[in-house]
Image: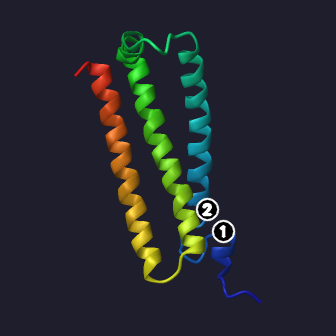
Amino acid sequence: MSLRSPLARVLGLGAAGDGSSHWWSQRISAVALTLLSLWFVISLAGLELSSEPAVSAWLATPLNTVLTVLLVSTLAYHSWLGVQVVVEDYVRGWMKIASLVTIQFLHFLLAALAVLAVLRVALGV
C-alpha cells in the first residue's frame, strides 16, 4: 500500500513535489559541460598557452568569449546542483539550511567572479 496519490505515481513526483527536475537539470548540464569542455580543450590545443597575448587574443574573439562564459556558468550551476544533493543527503538539522544557503551564495559569487575575469581578459581591461 502506498501513501502517494495515483497522479503522483504517474508523474513521478517526490515528496517535495519537484520530482525528477533536479535529476534532469544535472544530466542536461552534464551534457552541456561535456560539449563545452571538448570545445575548450580542442580550441586551446593549437594555442601557445605560455603566451599571454596569444591567449588574450583567442579569448577576445566574440565566439570564444561567449562559449567560455557559458562553460564557466554551466560549471558553477552543475557544481551547485551536485553539492546541494550531497548536503541534502548527509547534513541534518539547522546545519542543513545554513549549508544550503552558504553553498548557493558561494557558487553564485564564484561564478560571477569567473565571468568577470573572462570578460576583463576578453575586453582587455
Q: Position of residue 66 (x, y in %)?
A: 40, 26
Q: Residue furthest right?
A: 1
Q: Amino acid at mark 1?
A: Gly
Q: Measured from the top left, where is residue 73 in percent x and y?
A: 43, 40
Residue 77 picture location, percent across and down: 47, 48
Amino acid on which the number 2 mark rests in the picture: Ser
User: 2 or 102, which lies in front?
Assistant: 102
Residue 62: which quarter of the image?
A: top left
Q: State the residue position of label 2.
A: 20
From this viewpoint, is residue 18 visible? no
Q: Are marks 1 and 2 in contact (CB under 8 Å)?
A: yes
- Marks counted in the figure total 2
Q: Secondary structure at mark 1?
A: loop
Residue pictured at 55% horizontal, 30% vertical? 36
The residues tagged by marks 1 and 2 sit, at their Cα atoms, a distance apart of 7 Å
> Which sits in the foreground, 17 or 65?
65
